[in-house]
Image (cartoon, rainbow, N blue to C red):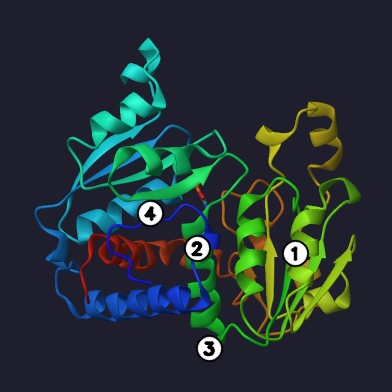
Amino acid sequence: MNFKGRSIISIRDLSVDDITNILGTAQKIESLTSQSPSKTLNIAKGKVIASLFFEPSTRTRLSFETAMQMLGAKVIGFSGTEGTSVKKGETLKDTALTVAQYADMIVMRHPLEGSARYVSEVAGIPVINGGDGANQHPTQTLLDLYTIAKRKGKISGLTIAMVGDLKYGRTVHSLAYALSLFDNIRLIFVSPEELKMPKYLVDEISKKQNIDIVETRDISDEVLKSDVIYVTRIQKERFPDPQEYHRLKSAYVIDAKLMEGAAKNTIVMHPLPRVDEISTDVDTMENAVYFPQAGNGVPVRMALILLLLGYDV
Ligand code: CP
């Protein structure tokens, strides 16, 4: 894929070769920035990038804005719609068409599923989806894959357990799909019955060759001995019934005691933010990689911005 001028809305926009290309570019960027005294690469100097966050975010917004700054681009935008003309009833289309007058690229998060695709169709500049409702969060998937590859030296051939809210968690939907593009993957989906991975997705990825899928409610010995345990938050804000959330919210807690049964080289990942599904006593264990995982958002998002703007590294 030639990335220049494209939008990244869904992980489904990317082939395995595209993903390999983005992760390879991120690796080069990480190496270059670690050697640069200023830790910056001013490749995108003169570009303006809009960061439009209609919904709360810490990691996605700040790592994107760090990536933009480290590339030398100017950053405009908002975090929350307070103080914008959205409050006066401006449509998403009009906001997008206006921002496209100022910026070379839009990075956005919005609560409405399909919103990023819509903006990419009307804005006339590249759009990167930083999360649209419970739908897609492709750059989280890219940094998850980058973290797995960095820690494990490969992606193919691994066993990955996903634990928690597999129904509403957009990160696990995208990650499960992306992993199914690689060879000899074993996926263990651990969730309460009510929060299982959507059937359409399980059916779709089951059809791929060289993939094993297990669905269970239990954190079994096999889960603890997986290459990766990917934990997710129970997504309170997506539950139509608050009582159901309260019934399920503490379904799984990964703590240091439970981790005594894990393999030494099992890594524990989490897209964050967490509530109580990973106890803080896990944070100091070598298995815990969720904060470095968040850090990997910077080189991966730098890579994506550069590729979409048509730059090479
Ligand atoms: N992982 C993630 O998307 O975190 P934020 O909601 O803080 O951006």
Q: Which numbered disc, 3 or 4, marks the residue closer to the eye?
A: 4
Residue identifier under label 1: 204
Q: Are marks 3 and 4 in contact (CB under 8 Å)?
A: no
- The residue under the point 25% across, 77% down is 34
Please rate how many residues cluster around mark 3, counting C-alpha atoms within 10 Å: few if below 14, some from 14 to 19, many from 20: few
Earlier in the chain: of badge 2 and badge 4, it is 4
Look at the numbered discs 1 and 3 and tell me whether their residues touch, using CB distance below 8 Å: no
- Image quarter of the N terminus: bottom left
> Position of 162 compared to 213: left or right?
left
Q: Are marks 2 and 4 in contact (CB under 8 Å)?
A: no
- Closer to the camera: disc 2 or disc 1? 1
Q: Give the spatial CA distance, label 3 vs label 4.
A: 29 Å
Residue 296: where, in percent of width, then height? Answer: 42, 67
Q: CA distance from mark 2 to mark 1?
A: 31 Å
Amino acid type, callout 2: Phe
Q: Is residue 50 left or right of residue 255?
A: left
